Amino acid sequence: MTFQKRRVALRSILSGSTCIRPGSVYDAISIRIAEDLGFEVGMFGGSVASLAVLGDPDVALITLTELAEQMRRMSRAAALPVLVDADHGYGNALNVRRTVEELEIAGAAGLTIEDTLLPQAFGQTATQLIPLSEGVGKMKAALDARDDPELVIIGRTGAASITSLDDAIARAKAYEATGVDALFVTGIKARSELEAIARATTLPIVLGGAPEEMSDLGYLASQRVRIALQGHAPIAAATQAVYETLKALGEGQSPKSLKGLASSELTGRVMRDADVKARSAEFLGLKK
Ligand SMILES: O=C([O-])CC(=O)C(=O)O
Ligand SMILES: [Mg+2]
């Protein structure tokens, strides 16, 4: 599927009337599994990018080149539209432009640019935000950098839990006015906060982690939430599985006695083995 078709598919989710859960994806294997299971969109979080590529926590150590390369690998492996967490755009508004260029070429269906001050400033323990005017400049730069008009650009703010709900509303309205395609809000702790943001804006909303009482997809849809994240359990499950497996092997268990391994059928599906075999027959002169 062309990159543009993936972007059109993401747009149709955002312009629809229901709220969906994205599959948390981070590499070629996870995106293929999410695609096979019928997820409509993949979320490539900055935290899982750091973990998968560097083995590090989410503290802005990953580079744009590393993020884009991982996205490119996923784009090759599957056609599932992916929404990429592009953090703060890896620098100032000029860096945001470059970030959009690279992620577009790497096949992202959409990306979020947030107004968090990253990396963490010297001597500051609490998360800080950049000024609203700088955030607006970053959104404009992101839109300016887009070559494919279908690439989805999403303005993100975590102001609700960093500064105030009023600030989150002011930022959401200002980003909406730049022409971004959707708003991504994080740090929402109550329905009333989401409702206030939804009332003050008109764009589709992508919701970051939210409390349990906000898990009802019908309710979220009524507040224009079209995509609701639910963390990154798949990479946590993978980490646990690798841990258990290496531990058992290290303790002397035989590979055959291990539990919880992918069957050869599942592994073959993930590897798209049937396609590779068919191509081998066709192109390696093996066809009878
Ligand atoms: O995008 C997400 O899923 C939430 C987030 O910021 C991250 O995981 O880095
Ligand atoms: Mg993030």
Image (tube, helix red, strand yellow):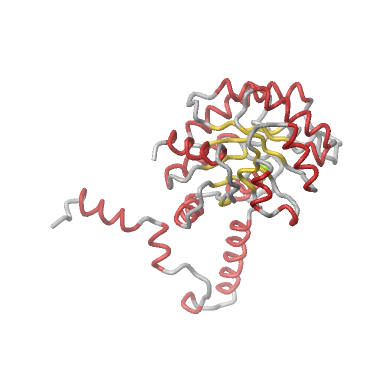
* Residue at the image point whose x is 78% and y is 34% from the top: 168
Give the percent coordinates (x, y) of residue 263: 43, 69
Quarter of the figure that contains the N terminus = top left
Q: Is residue 255 above or below residue 48?
A: below
**Left-right relation of 34 to 120:** left
Q: Is residue 181 above or below residue 225?
A: above
Give the percent coordinates (x, y) of residue 148: 48, 26
**Left-right relation of 62 to 35:** right
Residue 205 versus residue 270: which sits nearer the camera?
A: 205
* Residue at the image point whose x is 64% and y is 21% from the top: 140
Residue 66 versus residue 83: which sits nearer the camera?
A: 83
Quarter of the figure that contains the C terminus = bottom left
Give the percent coordinates (x, y) of residue 190: 80, 48
Give the percent coordinates (x, y) of residue 62: 63, 40
* Residue at the image point whose x is 65% and y is 31% from the top: 90
* Residue at the image point whose x is 61% and y is 43% from the top: 226
**Left-right relation of 186 to 108:** right
Q: Is residue 262 above or below residue 131?
A: below
Q: Is residue 59 above or below residue 202?
A: below
Residue 249 versus residue 93: which sits nearer the camera?
A: 93
